[in-house]
Image (spheres, rainbow, N blue to C red):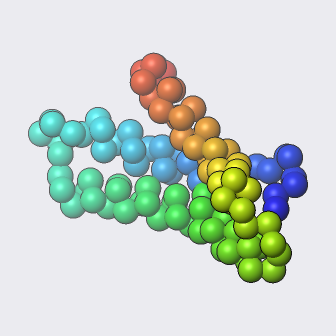
């Protein structure tokens, strides 16, 4: 289904806006700066960025379309096809988490 080996996730998927919203939420957690309205807004920003730019829904649509038009819908092939794109996006999230856990640069 996906034969392009040089697929690149959009920069906005886990871009600076998404990262800063996540960092700000974790920095404010448990401090006097914690404000539910601000934290929920940050969470909504993260969810919106991920759903709009990470293309998870496009992968599902592509899969259903592919499966409907062809006869390559064996479970092994289905899982392998869907996981290719999911792993690419998840790799970016893991890289961000690793950078965050190492501490913010000064």
In the depicted structure, whether residue 75 falls above or below residue 70: above
On the image, which quarter does residue 78 sit in? bottom right
Residue occupying the far front of the picture: 74
Kindly identify the residue that appears in the image at 80 percent across and 50 percent down: 7
Number of labels in the image equals 0
**Residue 51 in the figure: left or right of residue 47:** right
Kindly identify the residue that appears in the image at 76 percent across and 49 percent down: 8
Quadrant where the image shows the N terminus? bottom right
Residue 93 image point, x, y percent: 54, 41
Q: Is residue 65 visible?
A: yes
On the image, which quarter does residue 101 sit in? top left
In the depicted structure, whether residue 14 falls above or below residue 67: above
Q: 48 and 81: which one is in front?
A: 81
Kindly identify the residue that appears in the image at 12 percent across and 39 percent down: 32
Q: Is residue 12 visible?
A: no
Residue 14 image point, x, y percent: 56, 48
In the depicted structure, whether residue 76 falls above or below residue 102: below
**Residue 37 in the figure: left or right of residue 17:** left
Q: 91 and 33: which one is in front?
A: 91
**Residue 94 in the figure: left or right of residue 8:** left
On the image, which quarter does residue 64 sit in? bottom right
In the depicted structure, whether residue 106 falls above or below residue 87: above
Residue occupying the far left of the picture: 32
Residue 39 image point, x, y percent: 26, 53
Kindly identify the residue that appears in the image at 39 percent across and 44 percent down: 22
Residue 24 image point, x, y percent: 34, 42
């Amino acid at each position: 289904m996906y034969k392009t080996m040089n697929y690149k996730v959009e920069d906005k998927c886990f871009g600076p806006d998404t990262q800063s919203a996540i960092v700000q939420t974790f920095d404010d957690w448990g401090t006097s700066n914690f404000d539910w309205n601000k934290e929920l807004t940050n969470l909504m920003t993260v969810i919106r960025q991920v759903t709009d730019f990470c293309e998870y829904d496009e992968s599902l649509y592509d899969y259903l379309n592919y499966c409907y038009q062809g006869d390559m819908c064996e479970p092994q092939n289905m899982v392998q096809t869907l996981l290719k794109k999911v792993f690419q996006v998840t790799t970016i999230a893991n890289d961000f988490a690793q950078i965050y856990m190492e501490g913010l640069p000064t």
